[in-house]
Image (cartoon, rainbow, N blue to C red):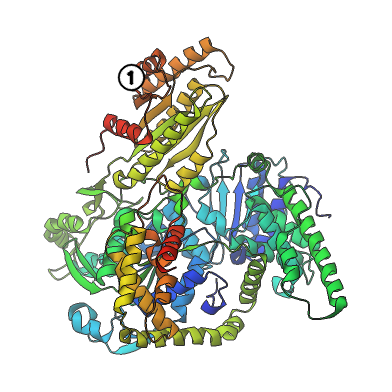
Amino acid sequence: MARFPFSAIVAQDEMKQALLIAAVDPSVGGVMVFGDRGTGKSTAARALASLLPPIMAAEGCPYGASKEDQARYPEVCGQGKMVKRAVPFVDMPLGATEDRVIGSLDLERALRSGEKAFEPGLLAKAHRGFLYIDEINLLEDHLVDLLLDVAASGENVVEREGLSVRHPAKFVLIGSGNPEEGELRPQLLDRFGLSVEVRTPKDIDVRISIMKLVAENEADPQGFSARWADEDTKILNRIAKGKARLPKLVPGEDVLRDAANLCLAVGADGLRGELTLMRAARALAALEGAKSVTRKHLVAIAPSALRHRLRRDVLDETGSTVRITRAIEELFG
Amino acid sequence: MTPAEQPADPLDEAVRAARLFLLAPTLYGGMVLRGSSPAREALVAALGDGIAMRRMPGHVDDERLLGGIDLAASLAAGSPVRQRGLIEEAAGGALITGMAERMDASIAGRLAQALDEGQAALVLCDDATEPDEGPPASLMERLAFACDLSQSRRWQGVELAPAKGTLAAVAPLGEAAMKGLAVTAELLGVDSLRALIFAGEAARGLAALEGRDAAGESDLAGAVRLVLGPRATRFPPEEAPEPPPEDEQDDQPPPPDGERDNQQDSEQQQQEQDLSDILVEAAKAAIPPGLLEQLSQGKAPRRGNTSGTGQKRKAANRGKPLGARPGMPRGGAKLALIDSLRAAVPWQPVRRREQGGDANSPIIMRKEDLRIRRFEERAARVTIFAVDASGSAAAARLAEAKGAVELMLAQAYVTRSEVALVAFRGEMAELLLPPTRSLTRARRSLTELPGGGGTPLAMGLNAARECAEAVIARGRSAALVVLTDGRANIAADGSPGRTQAKVDAEAAAKAIYARGIDSLVVDISARPGPEGAALANAMGGRFLALPRADAKMLQAAINAVQPPRAA
């Protein structure tokens, strides 16, 4: 299927917002998308990756190393000169083995010359880009553990098969899945920065407009992208401005207090909730071009940042989103 | 043909779908052909004339699917030999696979990716016989057409006539047509947008088959029958639908000016209304009969779930590593490279002499040097609850049982165990919840669990035993928890009668004993009688009387009987 322009994606505002926040500030942590099939999850993730401007990376480097990477990892990233390449988007299949993900001994070279060389895996490919995993809830737990670990540390450390390799692996992890088919352990969920719930749009007109756009894109992909190029550029500019603005935005005491109060009120376990809430609110403010981080940003992002961190009460049917909205109303009126 | 006309044989519809598929293989993704029948063979053969088909065995491994180094050939040649993967080989054509209902989730994931990228089309032959079984949902979703040929009585004369026109020559769908499809999808409970998009393209494709330049009413009806009908999750309302969105719309965008527009508007609406009526009629004719039965019982189909829940694979590629052993790395087994090299090294001087190499020549490996990794996998535990939902097991107790199952599930995160639920009441026992870790699904099937009726204890026990046997056959361990008052009054064949029921229940319990399944009988009647204990005795299991317990106590009791697996 042809790449679909990000700006042409209809509805699904929460998902788009979360993806943009992750693009502005990757340190927010990954994005977990819950939802049924056929709701545009992977379309949105792919569209975002192809929207972003190319990065400068060392030529021929399997890790797509930046200048800083070359300085930090001289032994793996080499001294190659910088060339442009597209932001990587790695679609990790469900059946991927650990070898393919973290990399393994290079079979070819080992067999030919008995040489011990490292063959980079998907994590290396995803460096400085996006790693998308559809049906992450069906992925084996140890792989999810590993992915989240690498995503958090920004570095892949391989110690196996007699190899000892360290290489940079900074990426935005995007997971998607349908909770009806099996759930992620709460420990893992907690490590995703944001989570969003996507539903298939129920409004007939929205559905019709989606059909129209897809048909247009199918009939003439080039022309279609060209028509949306302006809108895409606008989004791109917002991201670029947001990135530039981000370091200047320091959340005030009052916002931090709000964040802490909110996390206490909903009973989000651990400190990660507050931190993510703060970072995400800041990224949202940057994205909107605001002068400072305010309660408005905090409230806007709270459901995405906290929804998956609430302690689950099996006998309580109330959805997490409802609990958060209720807490916001009680606290901030 | 008129849209409401019933197709004479499922094969006719399948032939239409197949012609569409041939028109634009990657656009439609492919087709699912359900039911082993001569009709399917004939159709597949006819498809083979129209598109290059590559057969993919169900046990294909990653290397073969995606390509990579052909190890055996590389060793023989002394230099790396690449082999192309099946997906690559099928590029521009279609992969066809049989027994698709047994396909592994990891293979389905790869194929779904290939479909998304338009690398190859896919034809799935689904031999499932149970309505619950089916190919992986991730693939069903991505293939436009699903045809059930199991009831087909014909097989001769399958001919896929080439299209008279092309897709490109067909105009895009109009507003009214799209609306008709969208409303119909809504009425049928088809949520996925992919389905809707497929339906639109199928309508255009049908027009192209006939060489028309725009999709007409009959094309839309045909598209609904082919794409939306088989995906229906609910039965469209009998009454001529008065779609609420349209009424609301009437108020929202105020017509620019004048009555003329209004008039036109309502005329147009009337037409749209008629169109969606026609389409819904078409869809009704296309909903498969088995599905119809399920839908009329108000039950959404659970197709494709069998492979959705990340079933356990062989221990060849996961678990705790053990030592390596000689063998070829195929069928998912991984090469243990270091061990293989280690095995080859001592022979190097001899082999070099044989082959006339010198000390600088590359290491010479032979097939017998290869070592593969082995893993030890712990069997996951599945706790099967058999819940007596009869009238005698009072409603309140049923709620407790539900609570206990939910608590056990919440724990399943930690112990990585799974839970299944069998309920029996009236004249039937059914597997409400196949082994799962999903709390959401479990909760839903528990909420749907009705109470009342007789106590077909024997049926319940048999169903639970069958479930346990299936679990054990997959290499996992099963434990059975029966919540009942033990007062059976429906026999195994569904006839009422206390005496026969008791005999049958005892026989069923003994069968469980014979199978060596761990079991626990929890007597949930208000005044425990001797029946529960007798039942536990016959099953060789433990007995627990819980006349007044809440869900937490019940859970504690179950845990006490089944010590949690050591981590």
Residue B181 against residue B528 in the figure, above or below:
below
**Does residue B489 appear to the left or right of A65 in the view shown?**
right
Instruction: Tell me the residue at 64%/51% (across/down).
Output: B232
Q: What element carries label 1?
A: loop
Q: Which image quarter: residue A193? A: bottom left
Return the residue at label 1.
Answer: B540
The chain to which mark 1 is attached is: B
Residue B75 against residue B400 in the figure, above or below:
below
Look at the image and tell me whether residue A28 can be seen: no
Circle 1 packing at 10 Å, graded few (<14), some (14-19), many (20+), is many
Q: At label 1, which amino acid type do we have?
A: Gly
**Does residue B69 appear to the left or right of B493 in the view shown?**
left
Quadrant containing the N terminus of chain B is bottom right
Query: Residue B452's x, y, as percent?
Result: 56, 27
Quadrant containing the C terminus of chain B is top left
Residue B12 against residue A192 in the figure, above or below:
above
Q: How many labels does the image show?
A: 1
Instruction: Tell me the residue at 80%/54% (across/down).
Output: B3
**Does residue B112 appear to the left or right of A283 in the view shown?**
right
